[in-house]
Image: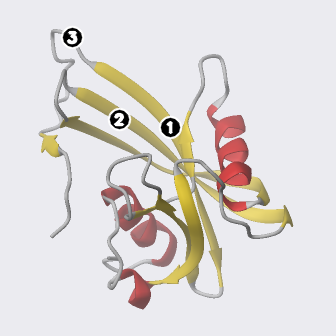
C-alpha cells in the first residue's frame, strides 16, 4: 500500500486561511515506449517511490528554465521543451497547514548529456520505465499522470 498525503478535494474558489503553495515543473521524456522516471531518495517523502524528473520553481525563475535545470540535476540529460502537456493542481495535508501543489508538465526531448543518477539530492536513481514495468513500481500520483499523458493507458 502506498503512503500518500491526505488529498483534499480541489475547489474552484480560493480557500480562506493559511496555507503553503508550491509551483513545480516536470518533464515527460520518452524513449522506445518508456518514460524517464526518478526514484525519490531518503531525503524526501515518500522515499523509494518513483516520480517524474523535475521540481520546484525558484523565486523569479521561469518554469521552463526550472524544468530544464531540474532534469539536468536529476538525470544528467540536457533537454529542449516541446510544449506544455498539462497542469496538475493538488490540495493535500501533511502535519501543519494545508498545501497546494501546482505542477506544470512539459513534453521534452534529450539534446545532450548522459544518464546519471543524482548524488546527494532528492532523487537517487533514474530509469526508463515502460507501462508494464510501471505497474510493478511504487509511483507517486504525478508519475501515474505522466504515464497516462506520455504513453496513454491507465499507467501505474
**SS label for mark 1:** strand
Crowd rating for badge 1 (residues with CA inside 10 Å; few <14, some 14–19, many 20+): many
At x 33% / y 60%, what residue is drawn?
Answer: 140
Q: Quadrant of residue 50?
A: bottom left
- Density class for disc 3 (Cα within 10 Å; few <14, some 14-19, many ≥20) is few
**Residue at mark 2:** 101
SS at badge 2: strand
In the rendered view, tell whether residue 58 sits above or below residue 112: above
Q: Distance between the residues labelled 2 and 1?
A: 8 Å
Q: Is 83 located above or below residue 10 in the figure?
A: below
- Say whether marks 2 and 1 touch (CB < 8 Å): yes
> In the image, what residue occupies the spot 78% across and 65% down?
110
Task: Estimate the x, y position of residue 79 in percent, counting from the top left.
Answer: 77, 56
Residue linked to disc 1: 24
* Gap between marks 1 and 3 measured at Cα: 20 Å
Can you tell which mark lies on residue 18?
Answer: 3
Amino acid at each position: 500500500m502506498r503512503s500518500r498525503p491526505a488529498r483534499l478535494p480541489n475547489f474552484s474558489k480560493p480557500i480562506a486561511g493559511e496555507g503553503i503553495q508550491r509551483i513545480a515543473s516536470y518533464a515527460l521524456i520518452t524513449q522506445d515506449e518508456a518514460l524517464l522516471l526518478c526514484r525519490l531518495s531518503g531525503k524526501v517523502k515518500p522515499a523509494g517511490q518513483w516520480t517524474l524528473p523535475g521540481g520546484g520553481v525558484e523565486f523569479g525563475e521561469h518554469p521552463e528554465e526550472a524544468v530544464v535545470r531540474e532534469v539536468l540535476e536529476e538525470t544528467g540529460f540536457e533537454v529542449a521543451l516541446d510544449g506544455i502537456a498539462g497542469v496538475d493542481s493538488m490540495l493535500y495535508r501533511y502535519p501543519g497547514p494545508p498545501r497546494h501543489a501546482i505542477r506544470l508538465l512539459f513534453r521534452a526531448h534529450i539534446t545532450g548529456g548522459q544518464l546519471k543518477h543524482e548524488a546527494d539530492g532528492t532523487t537517487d536513481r533514474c530509469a526508463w520505465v515502460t507501462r508494464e514495468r510501471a505497474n510493478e513500481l511504487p509511483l507517486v500520483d504525478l508519475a501515474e499522470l505522466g504515464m497516462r499523458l506520455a504513453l496513454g493507458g491507465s499507467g501505474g
